[in-house]
Amino acid sequence: MYRGLWTKGLVAGVILLFVGMSILSSVAQIIERPSLLKRNLLFVGGSGPGNYTHIQDAINTALDGDTVFVYDDSAPYYEHLLIDKSITLLGQNRSSTIIDGTNTSTGLHITSDCVIIRQFTFRNSGGEQTDTCILITANATTIINCTVYRARTGMIIQRGTNHTIMDCDVHTTGEGIYCSQTNALVISHCQLCHNAIGLRLNASINSTINNTFFHTNGLGCYFDHASTITMDHCALDDNNDNQGGAYLISCTDVLFNNNNICHNGVGINIGDSHDIQITYCDMKLNTKLAVLVDGTTSNVSLIGNEISHNYHYGIYTAAPLIAHDNNFYQNELHALHAISPCDATYNWWGTFFGPAITELGPGERISRNMVRHFPWLLHASSDVGSTWETATFFVSLHIPVNTRPLSIVGNDTDQDCAPDWWELKYNYDPYHWDDHAILDPDHDGLTNVDECYTDQWGSHPFKRDIFLEIDWMESNVTGTTNKPDQTLIVQAIALFETHNITLHIDTGAMGGGEMIPYHASPDYLYFRDLYWTYFLHQDLNSPRKGIFHYALITDDGEAGYTIFGWDQLDFFNVGAQQTQEKYPWYTKKHIIIHVALHELGHDLGLFGDTFGGIDNRESTKFTSWQTWKYLPYRSCMNYHYTYRILGYSDGTHGPGDFDDWAHLNLSLFKNTSFPVLSY
């Protein structure tokens, strides 16, 4: 095939004459790089003579330094690509030049150094643990202006140096970007949302993340055994109530500077890490904590931050830290709760009179004898916190509901995805097209198409249904089981029935529910992978996704917590054996059903900012005003009653009570968002 520049160069020149044409900017970006003028330009799609039909064919023909330009008129391209030479792969239009992995394997594997990928959408990887839309096993890869979504992992970067990811959106993945043993990574002007984990840095060094937005993830960032990380001018907002913004485990030399860390469960969670600096950040409205410091952590400093309006704690630390020149105000419980000595001088504590050591003081509360706080500032500092507002810099992506095909038996005369027999059963006209894929007349999060599929288990389109699959891990304690007790399941179902909600619990009768092998001390990463293995069965098109919530009962772990397994809040864990050992006066089967309903409440939208009595740790202490303030709140969502009351409150017990039932959001598990509910 003729590979000269004259013919293709002429095409490019003509294109440049027409400013309004859609590929002008793309080709102009090529020509702006003088080194490429000496290289070849290959075309895929389009109507030019000699253009390739398949992207891989053009890649195979290209030489180092060449550019492969891909038109969008033949998209989606259902290909699995290998780039083993130093080329530029350039799409005509980011949103419409699509490479689709057909839910199998890896979409693009880059094995050569100095590859540039620009202006593509990558989607639909396989569901196995090693599957990804983009796999990089080389050096100096640049990915610019791309969208990656609907994948087990969006991008995997294994080893290598000097990688750049810029102006990219990564969403609807089990892990947005996973980097292992990389050096000199730059992530800039990106948005990562609706992922179990937005960004994971594992054993990586010299990473820079700037001007990037992490929201509506299980965890915005997960850094483990990584060092020399700078996160600057980023927003970690609205991430899961039971995970949060950033989690550091065994990390060294990490700087958070000029960030907005707002409305997460925990803003920054630091464990067994060293040399951590948090400077000039806004940390507000976090539902549990702005900063949690635990383990063998050392040399943590917080300088010049705005730490305010957090629903429970500002800072909770089990390790020494330094906190200077911060503004603490209007944190609900403690501004600084410490069980190790802390130097917290020269801070503003919300009042001229300094901090308080009881709930009755006028200033922000601190721990008695553990916090050195004098001298304090006599007025709030004006030059602390971040220099910008998230809403003025970032616009959240609109994420469509992650749909999947459902196999429903029966003739469908009007082709509206609901079979005739079902439409007749519920007084729909089988000869009149209705948008059953959207219709949800009972507002339970299940569309009429979902209700067709679940009709086999007794669901009803005009009566609210909740489906919950429960798996249980084999117990390591002889003679015990983590399988929920059927008698207590019946009690839970009856409880929901009194509020006109049908709770369907699958422990084996509806296609799910099984015992899985024992694993000691599972962590969040392990739980996330169990979700993919035992709930989705590695299938991105699993029909259970978006219909069932998923629960896993184990020996180990916290009493319970809700988890992002993929892109939505539809998964929770109950650590039954460990909790039973902590509360030996309760049986394991009692603990399982009580904690399960508590965590299901989170799946249904009951969080710490929904009502102050939810997940309030102070409410278990009789010496705390919080216990007496929320004593009328007779709900398993109140830690004071979690093991005493099976079910939610109806708000009829006077001041300090709350109507849980009226505030349930049954569609949260497939349309997850975490709006700020109060200030």
Image (cartoon, rainbow, N blue to C red):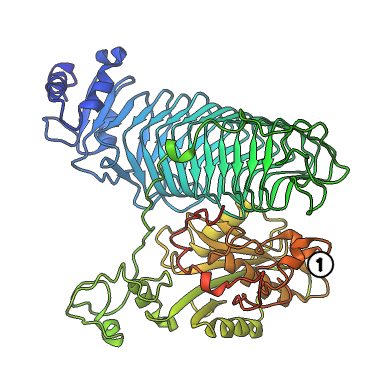
The residue where tag 1 is placed is 581
- Where is residue 26, by image quadrant? top left
- Placement of the N terminus among the 4 image quadrants: top left
488 horizontally vs 469: left or right: right
Label tally? 1
290 horizontally vs 566: left or right: right
183 above or below 409? above
Residue closer to the observer: 155 or 217:
217
* Whole-percent x, y for residue 221 in the image: 57, 42
83 horizontally vs 590: left or right: left
* Whole-percent x, y for residue 406 in the image: 35, 69
314 above or below 639? above
At label 1, the amino acid type is: Glu
Q: Secondary structure at mark 1?
A: helix
274 above or below 79? above
Name the residue rendered at 50%, 23% in the picture: 162
Q: Is residue 578 visible?
A: no
Q: Is residue 27 visible?
A: yes
* Whole-percent x, y for residue 289 in the image: 67, 48
651 horizontally vs 442: left or right: right
Q: Which residue is at the far right?
A: 369
* Whole-percent x, y for residue 384 in the image: 62, 30
